[in-house]
Amino acid sequence: MKLYIVIPCYNEQEVLPETSLRLKQKMTDLISKQMISDNSKVVFVDDGSKDQTWEMIAQLHDQDPMFSGVKLSCNKGHQNALLAGLTSVADLADAVISMDADLQDDINAIDGFISKYKQGCDVVYGVRSSREKDTFFKRFTAEGFYKLMSFLGVDIVFNHADYRLLSSRALQGLLEFKEVNLFLRGIVPMVGYKSDIVTYERAERFAGESKYPLKKMMSFAFEGITSLSIKPIRLIFSLGVGIFLISIAALIYSFVRYVSNNTVSGWTSLIMSIWLLSGIQLMAIGIIGEYIGKVYLETKERPKFIVEEFLNTK
Ligand code: UDP
Ligand code: MG
């Protein structure tokens, strides 16, 4: 079994030496146990880093053919970087594991991934066993996100990020999804095939800073929701219907008071309904605009990434 491990890296010079060391140990161990073939590889994808990341990857490749690299022409974000790596190994791998560069994903879970693969699973999801190490805020927002996703009818694995194994046919299937707004953890379950999970303890980032500050995280979540579900538009429609029915009732009430010569007095109710309805309308237009924007972007069929250089991924 020829295994590829694909790792997107954005400004990861602080962690790369340790990550590559531990990966080398793991790969050597797996090879000696004959769980993977000795031409298995680790592919680092440099997502337009501004530090020494690419130089380090090139150096690792020079020292050891097990390490290879893909350099993107500019920063395209984690999902696209991962996709670039997956695309570059699609015809070479029997199975591919995607993981982060910062050692938050427990390397020892790989054994579990491989044994599930050998039992016939095409997709193995790494699922965090607990969120104790996260801040309250992160836990709260993450939980809210997963709940919202399932409420919106999106099939998503709880507490699974992008640490997973894909068999070659699952990977081929994944690459059939051509959308520009790619939210991998929502798309992978749609590929189908037999899947299973392996739980692991998620560590703290080994070194360096998170490349996902709050703002990026929120936009990632928003992208995920709007590219996988059209339920928000339906909810807005229901909201509109609800408000319309209430207005009809209010209209009848006012009319009855008018004909009984008992006209409703008051400016407050008037101004409040104007503000409230304007707010709701603007929000509705915003959400609909978001979807139209998505259609616009998808019709352009722009490339999701452009590769500048390959370091022998074969
Ligand atoms: N990453 C990337 N491009 C980006 C941002 C992040 O390739 O624009 C990579 C990063 O190098 C890391 C992974 O995505 O390997 C996850 O990022 P990070 O650990 O910073 O996110 P967090 O774990 O804090 O959510
Ligand atoms: Mg991380």
Image: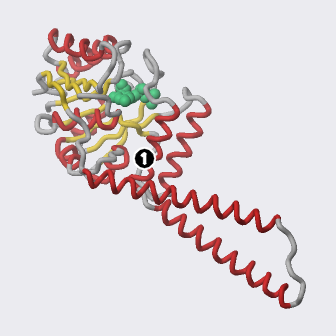
Residue 100 in sight from this viewpoint: no
In which image quadrant can residue 278 be found? Answer: bottom right
Q: Residue type at mark 1?
A: Glu
Q: Secondary structure at mark 1?
A: helix
The vertical placement of 3 against 299, above or below, is above
Q: Position of residue 184 (x, y in %)?
A: 33, 44
- The image position of residue 251, as x and y in percent, is 73, 81
User: Where's residue 129, x and y in %?
Assistant: 48, 34
Q: Nearer the viewer, residue 314 or 111?
A: 314
Q: Residues within 10 Å of mark 1 (few under 14, many from 20)?
A: some
Residue 226 falls left or right of residue 64 = right
Q: In front: 226, or 5? A: 226
Q: Residue at x 22, y 25 (%)?
A: 71
Q: Residue at x 22, y 20 (%)?
A: 27
Front residue of 132/91: it is 91
Q: Is residue 230 above or below residue 4?
A: below
**Quadrant of residue 100 in the image?**
top left
